[in-house]
Amino acid sequence: MAHIAFIGLGNMGGPMAANLVKAGHKVTAFDLVAALRDQAKADGAAIAESSVAAVKGAEIIVTMLPAGKHVLSVWNEVIPAMSRGALIIDCSTIDVESAKQAHALAARHGMLSVDAPVSGGTGGAKGATLTFMCGGEAKAFAAAKPVLENMGKKIVHCGGVGAGQAAKICNNMILAVSMIAVCEGFALAEKLGLSHQALFDVASTSSGQCWAMTSYCPVPGPVPTSPANNGYRPGFAAALMVKDLTLAQDAANAAGAATPLGKHAQEIYRAFDAAGHGGVDFSGIMQHVRSLAGK
């Protein structure tokens, strides 16, 4: 088993660190928030006084942070304190350029590095069923994969540095667009007097089938485990979808790609967030779609 430092113990990072403890690893954790450190301690991790202290002696470092600026700040702090040849994995969802800068920083200090954003939400983090989308050299990915398998069920090497972040934002742009389309279908069905179950029974087994329909249905009833049956409590909050859609639009603009539906999805989710619903699950966009009929 490895000695792992884990920095960033929020809704995703905390359960991920706990799963590494359950797998038998020695985990030293740090977060700026005292309550999160306390939870990690209760989950069996050792708690360090700082991010720099956390990485001392660790063979593997995992970061799970809000944005690219936070990742670069922490990596600049901890990499000089890491053992040469150690592996650093970033599981945050950040912009591709920041990910590339982080990789370059690690390489200058002789460290292996992987960008490995996740999909699966808080349920996947708790259940160790996340999907990891990984970017980096083959040697670094090979070193990271056994550790990531303790936190997820699907580990994909997407390519070179930054490729994991690229895959994540493309995937979530597709998800956002398809969720809005599913919500529009159900909203129209309601106006036409068609029951939720009837539309689900047809669309989930025919050409309208998609993950947003069959696994995360945005109306109560057809999929009992979906957030719609729990007051839209978030597995993946709408505010986080705004973040990912913004990253996708920034990347599209930089790459010269046309993503008109992705841009419109960003506008729709931004409006939902601005109306005070950023903490609602992203499938709660069903409520916003319904409200548009009255405008």
Image (cartoon, grey):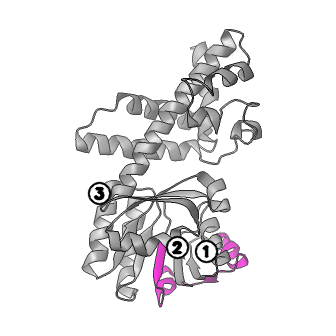
- 141 drawn magenta: no
**Which residue is drawn at the image coordinates 62% and 26% (left, top)?**
205
Residue neighbourhood size for the residue with mark 1, other residues' Cα within 10 Å, grouped as few (<14), some (14–19), many (≥20): many
- Few, some or many C-alpha atoms within 10 Å of disc 2 (few <14, some 14-19, many ≥20)? some
Foreground label between 2 and 3? 2
Task: Identify which residue is drawn at 42% across, 28% down.
Answer: 264
The residue shown at (60%, 72%) is 17
Residue 129 left/right relative to 158: right
Residue 189 occupies quadrant: top right
SS for dot 2 = helix
Is residue 55 one of those drawn in magenta?
Answer: yes
Question: Which residue is more in the foreground, 8 or 50?
Answer: 8
Q: Amino acid at mark 3?
A: Glu
Residue indicated by mark 3: 97
Q: Is residue 95 above or below residue 245?
A: below
Amino acid marked by disc 1: Leu
The residue wearing badge 2 is: 147
**Res. 193 image quadrant:** top right
Percent coordinates x, y for residue 134 in the rendering: 41, 61
Comes first in the chain, label 3 or label 1: 1
| The residue stretch that appears in magenta | 35-62
Q: Nearer the viewer, mark 1 or mark 2?
A: 2
| Residue beneath disc 1 | 20
Q: Position of residue 53 (x, y in %)?
A: 49, 87
